[in-house]
Amino acid sequence: MGSLIGQLALLPNNGHKIWEDPSFIKWRKRDAHVPMHCHESIEGSLKYWYERNKVNILVSKEAVWDDEAVARAIDCAAYWVNNLPFVKSLSGNWKFHLASSPCDAPTEFYDGSFQDSTWDSIPVPSNWQMHGFDRPIYTNVLYPFPLTPPKVPEDNPTGCYRTYFSLPKEWKGRRIFLHFEAVDSAFFTWVNGHPTGYSQDSRLPAEFEITDFCYPCGSDQKNCLAVQVMRWSDGSYLEDQDHWWLSGIHRDVLVLAKPKVFIADYFFKSNLAEDFSCADIQVEVKIDHSEMNIDSSPESGNFFKTSEDKFIASFTIEAEIFDSGSWNTGNEHPNLLSTSVAHLQLTNSVDYYLGFIGYQLKGKLQMPKLWTAEHPNLYTLVITLKDASGHVVDCESCQVGIRQMAKAPKQILVNGQPVMIRGVNRHEHHPRLGKTNLESCMVQDLLLMKQNNINAVRNSHYPQHQRWYELCDLFGMYMIDEANIETHGFHLSSNVKHPTNEPIWAASMLDRVIGMVDRDKNHACIISWSLGNESSYGPNHAALAGWVRGKDSTRLLHYEGGGARTSSTDIVCPMYMRVWDIVKIAQDPDELRPLILCEYSHSMGNSTGNIQEYWEAIDNTFGLQGGFIWDWVDQALLKEGSDGIKHWAYGGDFGDTPNDLNFCLNGLVWPDRSPHPAMHEVKFVYQPIKISLKEGTVKVTNTHFFSTTQELAFHWVVHGDGGELGSGILSLPTIDPQKSFDIKWDASPWYDPWCTSDATEIFVTITAKLLSSTRWAEAGHIVSSAQVQLPVKQNIVPHIIDVNQHALVTEFLDDSIEVKNSKLWGIKFNKQTGLIESWTVDGFLVMSKGIQPCFWRAPTDNDKGGEAKSYLSKWKLAKLNNLTFVTESCTVVDVSDNLVKIAIVYLGTPNDADKNLSPPQACLFKVDLVYSIYGSGDVILECHVKPNSDLPPLPRVGIEFHLDKSMDQIQWYGRGPFECYPDRKAAAHVGLYEQDVSSLHVPYIVPYECSGRADVRWVTFQNKNGRGIYASTYGGSPPMQMNASYYGTAELERATRLEELVKGEDIEVHLDHKHMGIGGDDSWSPCVHEKYLVPAVPYSFSIRLSPLIPPTSPQFIYRSQLQKK
C-alpha cells in the first residue's frame, strides 16, 4: 500500500488510508461544472441537439431488461457522444481483476508494461457484482459494515481496471481531460503509469486533466488507463440509501479535448416580466485561460482591472438562443440557424457584489414560450468563444427552458401558478445492469410516468445520469434534484457522532451539494434542490442550505431531515405523514410554507391503499400541494435459479448479510416496468380532468394550470346492469385551465338512455383522450376516465323465487345428503361436516369442496408491518391463522318436492386449543349457514357470523369453496378489470368483465393475498362448454369482494418467492361480505384506515348460487332476483 501512496505522491509513506479520511475527498479533480460537449461550431451544436431531441414512443420500445442490456449499455455510451468531434467514449470491455482489499491490488498494475492477459474482462459501464464478481447487498437502514466512522472493513473488495485508448491527430494542441460520469465508491486513476487523480461521491462526475500524461495525438502508441475502485470508503457513510450496494464504474468514461483557452462553465438564468410577456436572460460564463501567459496583476492605480479584463481584449464571448420547438416542422433538413430568437451581449466581466468572477451576458426575449411540465418548451443556448480574428475557439451548448419559480403564502408557484405535484420517487435501477442506464429504459420510465399522469419526480436519493435530466426537460417533468447524502444508519447508534454535527464531514457534504448544483443548474425541470435524505439535521445542513441559496436564488430548497420544518427547507416535506396530520399543518396559520409529501403511499407489493383519501384532502385543502409516492420500481435483480431460469431476486438471495429481504420491492412497476395494478389508482387520483355529479349536474373540471381541453376528445358511455345503453362523443366547449363546465341532467346525451332503461343500476363513464399524438403517447391515449352512478329511478326489492316451478329429488344416504333435479344438476352434502362434496351441472363436476366460512388471508407486507403491533402479530396472537371449523350440527330443517333447507352450525376453534376445553368453550367464531335449495337449482345461502368480541380486526368475513380446475372462465359484474380492494378501487369502474383464472393472478415477487375484485354483484365460473356456476349477492346484502386462484391461501402464505408457487389441483374461490383494506400509508405500522377495517362484530349476509347451462345468461339470472317496487 505504501508504494501506491508513493506513486500517487499524495501522502507520506506512512500507511495512511486516504479512503478512510473524510477530510481528503479528492485530488487533482477539477471543479464541478455543467456537462461539456466541445462543439466545433454553432451549426454543429444545433445539429447535435436536433438529433438528441428525436425521442418518442418508438425509443421506449427498444428498452431491454435482460442480458441483451449489457451490450446495449456500451452502445448507448457511444451514442451519447455521437457527433461530438472532441469527445470520445472509452466505454467497452476492459480488463478487470477483483482484489480482496486495496492492499492486495496487484503491484504496479497501473503501469503500461503490466501483463493483464490473465485478467478477466468486464463491460464498462457496469457494476462488477452484476457480472459475477463479489455480491450485491441490499439494506434499507443498516450499514453493511460496522458503524465505526470513518473506518471501513479490511475486507474491502477492490476492482482493478485497465484499458487502452488513442487520441485522434485532430486533437493536437488541445488540452485533454479524463471524465468519469460516476464511480462507486472511491477510486484512484493513472494514465501511462502516472497518478492522475482520486475522487469520492458515487453519483457525480470526476474529471482530471491528463494532457501531460498522454502520448501525442495521432501517435501509434496507445495510452494505458488504469483505475482502482474501492467498494467501501469513508464516503460510504454518506451513502446509506435504501437500495442495492453495488460497485464499480457504473456510468460512462469519456475523454474530452478542449482548446488551450476554453469555456469552463456557464449558468443560465431567466427573469420573467410580471405579465410573462418577456424574459430577461442572463448567462454567467467562466473561462479557463490558465494556459495563457496573462499578467494577472492589477494595473497601477486601477485595482479592479485584473487579468479577466485583459483577457477579453483578445477574445470575444457570445451567446445566442435558438427556438428548439420550431425544429419539429416535418422538414428533414430544417434551417437550424434561422431559428435564432435572441443574441446576448457581454455586459461586464466581474460582479464583485455577487462574488462571481467571470463574464455576464444579457439579453431579452419577447413573448417567450414558457417551460412547464404541461408544455415543456425548450430553447437551445449556444455559447461561443472567438479569437481576435473571429474564429470559433470553443463552443458549448445546452437545452434551456424559460420558467419562473416563486414562493407565495402556503404555495410554490411555477410561472405564477400553484402547480400540483403529482409525483413519484425514482431510484436508478435496472434488473440486469444494476445502476447503469440505458436511454431507451429511461425513456420508458418517462413515458409510463406521463401516461399515468405523473408530473414530478424526486431523484431518490442522489443525482442521476445527466441524460435523465435532459429527458425530463424534454418530456416535461418537475424534479427535485437530491444530493448524494444519506446517513440513515446513524439513527441506530446513539453513541456515534453524527456527520451533520461534525466539522470534519462538512467539506465532504458540501462538495456533494456543490457538485450536484454545478452540474445540473441549467435544467428547467429542476424546481427544487434537496440537501439529501434521512440524515438528521445539524449545522452542516445549515451550511449546505446557505451555500445553495447563495448560489441559486431561482429555485426552492427541500430537506426532510430534522422534522421536515427546519429553516433549511422552503417546503414542509414530511414522509408518510397521515392524512389528518397534513391537513392540520396546512391549516396552521403560522406555517406559511406549502406542504408536499416527499414520500407517501408506500407501494410495497399489494399496497397503495388509501391514496384516494390523500388526494381528497390535497385537492380540497389550501396549503397542500401534492407529494411523491414511494416509489417507482421494484428493485429486484435478475438471478439464475437452480432451474436454470432467471428470477427476480431480493435482499439475502445473493448470500448478502446483513440484508433487509424484500423491502426493496416498493414499486408501482415491476423491474421490467410492467405496471402493478395500483398504477391504475395512481393514474386516477392524478388525472387532470375531474368528473363529479351533484344535484343532477355533471361537472367537468380541468385541473391543468396551463392547458385548455382543446387537445382532448371527450366521450361518454352509459351502462345499465353491465350492458351498454348508449355512447357517443361528448361535445364540450374548450375548458380553460382551472375552470369547469356543468352539464345539466336533462340536457345530457345520457338522459334519454337513462329514461328508457329499466336497468337497476346505471353508470355513465366519461373519458378524455388525446386528439393527437405527443412525444409520450399516441393519439387516443386516455388521459382521464371517471364513472358516476346515475340516480336510481325505482327502489329494488328481492325477488321471491317460485318454489313451485321445478321439482327436485332428495336422497338421504348413510354419510351424505343428495339433492338434484333430473340430470341438470346435483349437490352432495357430507352429513357429518355439512360441506358440499360435489356439485355437478349437466354432468360436469363444478364444485369439488365447500362451502365453509373463511376469515383468513395470506398476509401482505402491510399486514406484517409493525412487529408486535402489526395486524399479523395480532391475528396470530388471536390464533386466527390456525382455525379449524368444527361442525356443531348439520340439520335438514325442511324438505318438500320443491325446496330443501339445510342448517349447519360451525364453530371456529384454534387447532392448538386447550384440549380440556370443549369446542364451544374454545370457539372464536360461531357461524350459522342455512342452505335453501330450490327445484330451479337456485341455492340461497344465508350466513350469520358471531365472532368473539375481543378479537382484533379481521382479515375477511366470507365463504370459501373449491371448483374443478376446468371452471376457469370467469365473468363478473363489479369493479375491474384489474385487481382492486376496498381501499384501492376508485379507478376500477363497475362493469361486465371476463378473464380466465390464470390471468386474474397478480405475480407479485413475494406472494400473498392478491387478485381480488371489489364490489362484485355477480360472478360466473364456467368451463369452455359454458357449464358452471353463478354466484351473486342476495337480498339486501351489499356487493362482495371476489377472488379466484389456482394458488390457495395456504400456498400464497407458504411461498416466499413467485417461482416457488405450486398450482393447486382445483380453483380456490373466496366470496367475501367484508374484506379488510390493504393499507399503504406505510409498510411498518398497522395503517389501514378505520373505515376499511373489519371489526369483530356480528355479520349477516346472503349469497345466491345457481347452476349455469347455456343458453341461460348470468344477466338473466341476476335480473330475475330483482323486482322494482
Image (cartoon, rainbow, N blue to C red):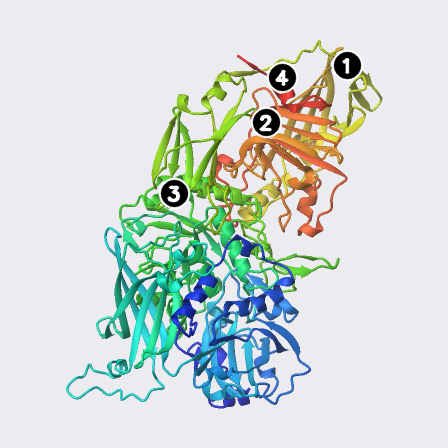
Query: For the residues marked 2 and 4, what is the alpha-carbon distance in whole angstroms?
Result: 13 Å
Query: For the residues marked 3 and 1, what is the alpha-carbon distance in whole angstroms?
Result: 59 Å
Q: Quadrant of residue 819?
A: top right
Sequence-wise, the earlier of marks 1 and 4 is 1
Of circles 1 and 2, which is in front?
A: 2
- Observer able to see residue 136: no
* Disc 1 residue crowd, few under 14, some 14–19, many 20+, Cα 10 Å: many
Query: For the residues marked 1 and 4, what is the alpha-carbon distance in whole angstroms?
Result: 20 Å
Residue plotted at (54% across, 63% down): 437
In this picture, is 711 found above or below 796? below
The image position of residue 269, as x and y in percent, is: 30, 63
Report which residue position mark 3 lands on: 618
Report which residue position mark 4 lands on: 1120
The image position of residue 277, as x and y in percent, is: 25, 53
Sequence-wise, the earlier of marks 3 and 4 is 3
In this picture, is 1061 found above or below 148? above
Report which residue position mark 1 lands on: 808
Quick check: marks 3 and 4 in contact, CB under 8 Å? no
Along the viewing direction, whichever of 118 and 773 lies nearer the viewer: 773
Task: Say which element carries label 1.
Answer: loop
Report which residue position mark 2 lands on: 1017
| Amino acid type, callout 2 | Arg
Query: For the residues marked 3 and 2, what is the alpha-carbon distance in whole angstroms?
Result: 32 Å
* Disc 3 residue crowd, few under 14, some 14–19, many 20+, Cα 10 Å: many
Task: Say which element carries label 3.
Answer: helix
* Disc 2 residue crowd, few under 14, some 14–19, many 20+, Cα 10 Å: many
Quick check: marks 3 and 1 in contact, CB under 8 Å? no
Of circles 3 and 4, which is in front?
A: 4
Task: Say which element carries label 2.
Answer: loop
